[in-house]
Image (tube, rainbow, N blue to C red):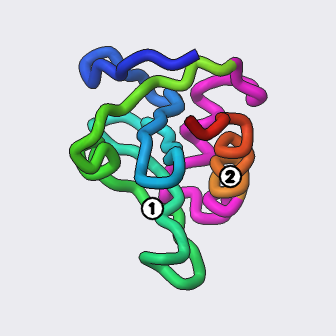
Amino acid sequence: MKHLADPRALVPGTQLVARRRGYVHFGIYVGCGRVVHYAGRLQYPQGLVEEISLPDFAAGRPVYVDSTPDRFTGKEDIVRRALPARRTLLRRVAEQLRALQQLVPDG
């Protein structure tokens, strides 16, 4: 289930969803108005997980909170895996985001 994200109520580890033309885009809120997301192969040919601002992630579209139960131990674990300071974990975050994208039906 998804509901419209209220930026004032977001906590680190919240999974975010934004619809794009032809696909659904996922990110992980890491605090201080920042989101970690998979930037994709169009922008970066080898793929890149990056940290950007919430408005940049939204790209002018509504952002929703993905309230699907986490498969992880908790939101702190999600943030720990997502923070750029943990570069060795970013590949795992990208894999998790791709797995989450497969869980959400297009529509």
Is mark 1 in CB contact (under 8 Å) with mark 2? Answer: no
Percent position of residue 44, x then y:
48, 79
- Please tell me whether residue 2 belongs to the stretch shown in magenta: no
> Mark 1 and mark 2: span between their CA atoms?
14 Å
Q: Is residue 62 above or below residue 42?
A: above
Task: Give, as a three-letter code, the residue at label 2.
Answer: Arg
Q: Quadrant of the C terminus?
A: top right
Circle 2 is placed at which residue position?
A: 98
- Please tell me whether residue 73 belongs to the stretch shown in magenta: yes
Q: Nearer the viewer, mark 1 or mark 2?
A: 2
Q: Which residues are magenta?
A: 69-91
Q: Residue at x 64, y 48 (%)?
A: 97
Q: Residue at x 36, y 32 (%)?
A: 63
Percent position of residue 69, x then y:
70, 18
Q: Residue at x 48, y 58 (%)?
A: 84
Q: Is residue 97 above or below residue 41?
A: above
Circle 1 is placed at which residue position?
A: 50
Q: Is residue 73 above or below residue 107?
A: above
Looking at this view, name the residue that lies furthest to the front: 107
Element type at mark 1: strand
Q: Nearer the viewer, residue 97 or 21?
A: 21
Q: Is residue 80 above or below residue 86?
A: above
Percent position of residue 96, x then y:
70, 47
Q: Nearer the viewer, residue 96 or 78?
A: 96
Question: In the image, is 89 to the left or to the right of 1?
Answer: right
Q: Quadrant of the N terminus?
A: top right
Q: Earlier in the sequence, mark 1 or mark 2?
A: 1
